[in-house]
Amino acid sequence: MKRKCEICGQQTDKFLPVNPCFRQEQERFGYGPTEPETLNESEYVCETCQSTDRERMCASFLNKILKEHLIRLNVLEVAPGHVLSEFFSEQYPVCTYKTADLFMEGVDYKVDVQDMEEIRNGQFDMVICFHVLEHVKDDRKALREFYRILSENGIGIFLVPIDLLQKETEEAWGLSKEENIRRFGQEDHVRKYSRQGFIDRMEDAGFSVLSLDTKWFGWRNCRQNAYSKTATLYIAVKNPAYGKQNLKDVFAGHFFSYASEKADSQSVRYSIDGVEKKGEACSVWGWIFHKSCKYGRIIKGVLCLKKGSRVIYRKQFEFTKRQDVMRIYGEQYEYSGIEVAFPLRRIKKGTYEMAFLLFNDRKAYEVDVKKSISV
């Protein structure tokens, strides 16, 4: 079976391996033997989007619980990379995505996860924290902070480097870089987690823990994304009603979903001026506005490709200036232009109907475009 990246959709015979310098340095300082729980060293990185196996697993989880819903979530990613940021922007544009880190520039919250006082109680519905807790002095305090900032029905998506050969979690602060490598596998790691030890610490913070293994994700998805056989994603929940089997429906049911209604054809104006396939991308441009939503109320737009009632692909776009539209319909519609491009690799060959979602702060207006597109 060919690999197919969950995030960018690119097909390949094989993903790229971990940089061999990683293991060479560990061997140099005497680290090992080890059996990583969630790491496929031979097929780690997607060459196209640079996603790691843990980021692809996170995307698989999100697609499984959110794909069929139009849910507005407040999401926080700690120690972010560009991969999940772009994934949320493209696939879940209704969500509000924020970032946090103590040292990185350009994040929304420059905070220590052990003390995030500027983030209020229950502010976020989802926290994503990968390979951070093994770096901090007091991971128990950090987990309590994550519990505090999550909403009552929120979830934390956590991963740390777990060694399946490790019987108990081992930790020490203030060692030399060389000693950290020898004991914990990396110069800035301060602990080495056992599987049960990590679960115990999440539970001590107040969470119930769902361990999602390859069986939960399904054989096909695991093969396409090259997850290791022991790969596990940890979901920390505050609501004990959540379980492995009901997570999708119960989680979606707790959050405000945009009320999506068909826009009145008399109140919508639009024109698709062009559709062009060039190389590996397809571009769509034109203009659209909803007359009942005066200038400033529409907060974002999303292009959808549909098969019948099923949405196959979404892509957010920004409204651009169209002074020609403004001259005809009024100055409040100056920002009505659309320019959106999407990668063809994300979509199977076929013919799709186009639709637009126009969002204000309360609902989404769905506009079926009387134009199809073949890819």
Image (cartoon, rainbow, N blue to C red):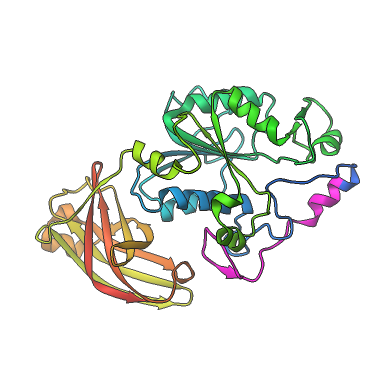
Could you say which is closer to the camera, residue 200 or residue 129? 200
Report x, y in % for residue 310: 33, 62
Report x, y in % for residue 315: 38, 59
Residue drawn at x 59%, y 63% is: 224
Q: From the viewer's perspective, is 189 left or right of 277?
A: right
Residue drawn at x 48%, y 35% is: 155
Could you say which is closer to the camera, residue 57 or residue 128? 57
Q: From the viewer's perspective, is 295 left or right of 197?
A: left
Residue at the limit of the structure toward the left, as seen here:
266
Figure quadrant of residue 135: top right
Q: Can see residue 114?
A: no
Q: Is the residue 224 above or below the residue 34 in the image?
A: below
Residue drawn at x 65%, y 27% is: 200
Q: Locate the N terminus by quadrant.
A: bottom right
Q: From the viewer's perspective, is 269 left or right of 18?
A: left
Could you say which is closer to the camera, residue 338 or residue 37? 37
Report x, y in % for residue 110: 54, 32
Q: From the viewer's perspective, is 349 left or right of 274?
A: right
The span picked out in magenta is 1-26
Report x, y in % for residue 194: 73, 34
Residue drawn at x 11%, y 60% is: 329
Figure quadrant of residue 140: top right
Q: Is residue 7 magenta?
A: yes
